[in-house]
Image (tube, grey):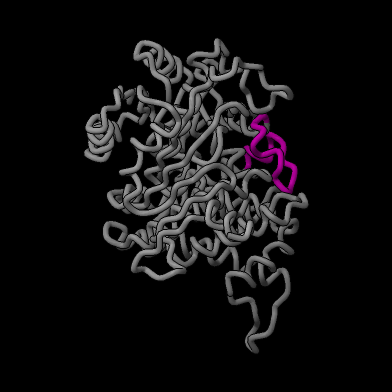
């Protein structure tokens, strides 16, 4: 067999089903950027994947809500039927904390675990990876802070293998070791990662069929935010830009279907799971001010991350307008958004930005995204000191450092005030 054909067979082993060769609801194995086993029904392969990693005593990590569901019970049953000695740790908050991670690390050691199975949205996935990084290494979470220039050295095998099993299509946390958590002492979100944390992805879209419409909407908008913010980062990375645009196209085509009929539409769920993973690959390039503010909001007010992003995204698009109009022209062409005048011609970069903003606002309305932060549980009666404190936390959050327009604490405070009040995004200005 020619070498090119052998490589194609090994790197993209496709088992096509009745959905057609272009359907996402078929099975495929990818090696980029990490080993990924994608396709409906593939959760059944979890025991064999663990065996292939030489593991037989995993700690299955998930969040408090998901831990009590039949989905987790089925995964646990399949492992035990295969002779795998599994323990479940589900003491993880929706916004994971350092306290949750320390408790999980203790559970890992008490079980004598040799691997991690991280199940869920961002909460279970991030907590599982964080536990793997610290349980047997002796490292503190601050020693694996992603901003540390030289990651702390660990003994070979000290960080156990991790299988990530996403149950939402939005966070993209399954695709690398980077993991968010709340530093409870400082009241801020931090990100940790380590190059020795090896991740294998088991992406089964059928695990998202039971996701309710509101969570489908919130996590889907999280994926869109990742794609758009990555695209608009002012850096030359054409590979990430291309992946970001394709992720946005999939959201345009499939998020509405997943929201409306997600309990039965495996193709829509598959396309959105792929979109989420692609957006996570794209944001290796960076993110922006939407995340710059949403992450400290999550740390202080414990709001759902994707929902906060969905509310903030239109405001951030407006404040970035003059820096991103050119990229919006590229995006509008790829997504076939209407940008012409009455004659149907090309209206230029400004018209392309308007088309992108119109699309994002219309999608939010279709998905019933609230129009203000006050509607998602943040008090509208905050004092000046609370606004100033949030502005400072957002300005210090490195996630927003790659926003195409540099923002300071005062700018973030204005953004927070506008989004809390529900000021129409088109009327928002930093001036």
Q: Height in image: 156 above or below 276?
A: above
The x and y percentages for residue 113 are 39, 18
The residue at the point 50 percent across, 28 percent down is: 299
Q: Residue furthest front?
A: 1
The x and y percentages for residue 59 are 37, 23
> Which of the 4 image quarters holds residue 137?
top right
> Which of the 4 image quarters holds residue 401?
top right
Residue 16 part of the magenta-drawn span: no
Q: Main structural element of the magenta stretch: helix, strand or loop?
A: helix
The residue at the point 58 percent across, 60 percent down is: 1
User: Is 311 left or right of 39, judged from the image as shown?
Assistant: right
The x and y percentages for residue 266 are 33, 60
The x and y percentages for residue 301 are 45, 31
**Residue situated in front as seen by the camera: 279 or 17:** 17
Q: Which residues are magenta?
A: 396-414
The residue at the point 22 percent across, 39 percent down is: 70
User: Is 266 left or right of 145, judged from the image as shown?
Assistant: left
The residue at the point 27 percent across, 57 percent down is: 263
Residue 417 seen by the camera: yes
Residue 406 part of the magenta-drawn span: yes
**Residue situated in front as seen by the camera: 127 or 116:** 116
Residue 431 seen by the camera: no
User: Is 321 left or right of 95, judged from the image as shown?
Assistant: right
> Which of the 4 image quarters holds residue 358?
bottom right
User: Is 289 left or right of 180, judged from the image as shown?
Assistant: right
């Amino acid at each position: 067999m020619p070498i090119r054909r052998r490589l194609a067979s090994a790197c993209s082993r496709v088992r096509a089903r009745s959905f057609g060769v272009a359907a996402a609801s078929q099975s495929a194995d990818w090696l980029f950027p990490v080993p990924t086993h994608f396709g409906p029904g593939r959760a059944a392969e979890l025991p064999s994947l663990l065996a292939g990693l030489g593991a037989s005593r995993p700690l299955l990590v998930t969040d408090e809500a998901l831990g009590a569901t039949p989905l987790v019970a089925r995964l646990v049953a399949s492992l035990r039927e295969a002779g795998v000695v599994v323990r479940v740790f589900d003491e993880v908050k929706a916004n994971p904390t350092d306290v949750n991670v320390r408790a999980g690390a203790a559970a890992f050691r008490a079980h004598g675990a040799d691997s991690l199975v991280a199940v869920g949205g961002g909460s279970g996935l991030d907590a599982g990876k964080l536990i793997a990084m610290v349980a047997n290494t002796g490292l503190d979470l601050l020693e694996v802070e992603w901003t540390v220039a030289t990651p702390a050295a660990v003994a070979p095998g000290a960080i156990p293998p991790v299988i990530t099993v996403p149950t939402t299509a939005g966070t993209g946390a399954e695709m690398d070791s980077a993991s968010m958590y709340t530093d409870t002492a400082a009241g801020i979100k931090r990100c940790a990662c380590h190059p020795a944390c090896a991740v294998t992805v088991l992406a089964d879209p059928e695990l998202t069929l039971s996701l309710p419409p509101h969570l489908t909407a919130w996590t889907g908008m999280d994926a869109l935010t990742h794609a758009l913010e990555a695209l608009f980062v002012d850096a030359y990375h054409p590979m990430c830009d291309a992946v970001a645009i394709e992720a946005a196209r999939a959201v345009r085509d499939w998020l509405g279907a997943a929201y409306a009929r997600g309990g039965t539409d495996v193709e829509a769920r598959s396309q959105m799971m792929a979109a989420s993973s692609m957006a996570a690959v794209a944001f290796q390039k960076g993110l922006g001010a939407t995340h710059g503010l949403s992450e400290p909001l999550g740390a202080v007010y414990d709001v759902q991350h994707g929902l906060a992003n969905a509310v903030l995204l239109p405001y951030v698009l407006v404040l970035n307008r003059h820096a991103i109009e050119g990229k919006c022209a590229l995006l509008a062409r790829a997504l076939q958004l209407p940008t012409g005048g009455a004659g149907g011609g090309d209206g230029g970069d400004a018209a392309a930005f308007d088309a992108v903003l119109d699309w994002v606002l219309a999608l939010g309305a279709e998905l019933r995204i609230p129009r203000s932060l006050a509607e998602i549980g943040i008090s509208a009666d905050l004092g000046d000191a609370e606004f100033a404190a949030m502005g400072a936390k957002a300005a210090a959050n490195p996630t927003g450092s790659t926003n195409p327009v540099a923002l300071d604490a005062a700018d973030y405070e204005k953004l927070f005030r506008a989004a809390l009040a529900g000021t129409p995004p088109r009327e928002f200005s930093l001036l």
